[in-house]
Amino acid sequence: MREFVIMTDSCCDMTAKMAADLELEVLPLSLHMGAQEYRNLLDGSEIGFQDFYNRIRSGEEATTSAISVGAFEERMRPILRQGRDILCINFSSALSTTYQSAAIAAEDMRAEFPEAKVLVVDSLCASLGQGLLVYLCAQEKKRGATIDEVHAFAEATKGRVCHWFTVDDLNHLKRGGRISAATALFGTMLSIKPVMHVDDTGHLVPVSKARGRRSSLVELVNHMEKTAVDPAHQTVFISHGDCEGDALFVADEIKKRFGTEQIYLNFVGPVIGNHSGPGTVALFFLGSQR
């Protein structure tokens, strides 16, 4: 049986240590800010997470770039030359063209290395939701599953990775076209916080509204209570837009309510954070449905 590598992109928002421990190949998306281009590396070495959010708070704007076909081929080719196969799990195709680039690169690599398997998964996930799917796939690999078995697991599991999140500043969603200018204005005046999720097609969808920050954070946990499968014994991920205290509040609520022990926190990286803004808190877990 040929060895295989799990490849993903930086929108998984894992810590660099976790990605290294899981032996992942991670390709970075890019961010253009000011006159400079930064790679969204998991260790924040080109643009630090807090630095990025401070610049966003000060009014700087940024644009983001997906990973090119050529960048995928450049990372895939040496792995295939070593006689290893690749399972590539990417950021939702509804939010980026990164998956499409990976799929085109995989087709090219299969033609160049006909004996190899290069399998690509559209995660339909974002941030640590993508990270959670990749993490679970890496656990299957550690248990000895083949590339085909892990690929099947990813396809069967991705629709159960629940994404619930809220934002503190509605103006970032307004800029991204997620809400209207009027909704942002009146929501800000009334301290209304949206509660959103990523649906079955990988799109961001507003679901409800909460009055005040604390209520919106509790509402994330309420949604977990409705659909989570065996929440006490699963791994839960929480990402945040430079508001670790709020993320810890959500983690504490989960521990109190469900007794969950494995909860991991990390920043929402700058590529996704450019659209969601500072103050984002996002909760990811496995549910019976999204």
Image (spheres, grey):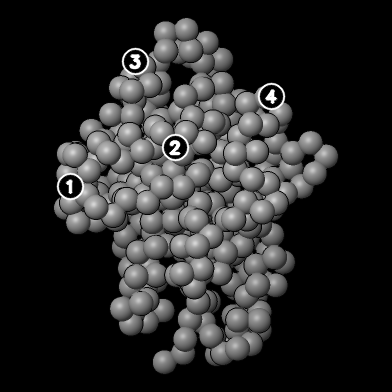
Residue 48: image tag: none
Q: Can residue 189 be seen from the camera position used here?
A: yes
Query: Judging from the image, what secondary structure is the residue with disc 2 in?
Result: helix
In this rendering, the label closer to the viewer, 1 or 4: 1
| N-terminal-most mark, 2 or 4 | 4
- For disc 1, the marked residue is 259
Residue 77 placement (x, y as % from top left): 66, 79
Q: Are marks 2 and 4 in contact (CB under 8 Å)?
A: no
Q: For numbered disc 4, what is the local secondary structure?
A: loop
- Distance from Cα at disc 1 to Cα at disc 4: 40 Å
Residue 37 image position (x, y, % from top left): 76, 47
Which residue in the structure is indicated by mark 2? 244
- Residue under pointer 4: 59
Q: Amino acid at mark 4?
A: Gly
What residue sits 62% from the left and 75% below the top?
A: 76
The three-letter code of the residue at mark 1 reads Gly
Cα distance, mark 1 to mark 3? 27 Å
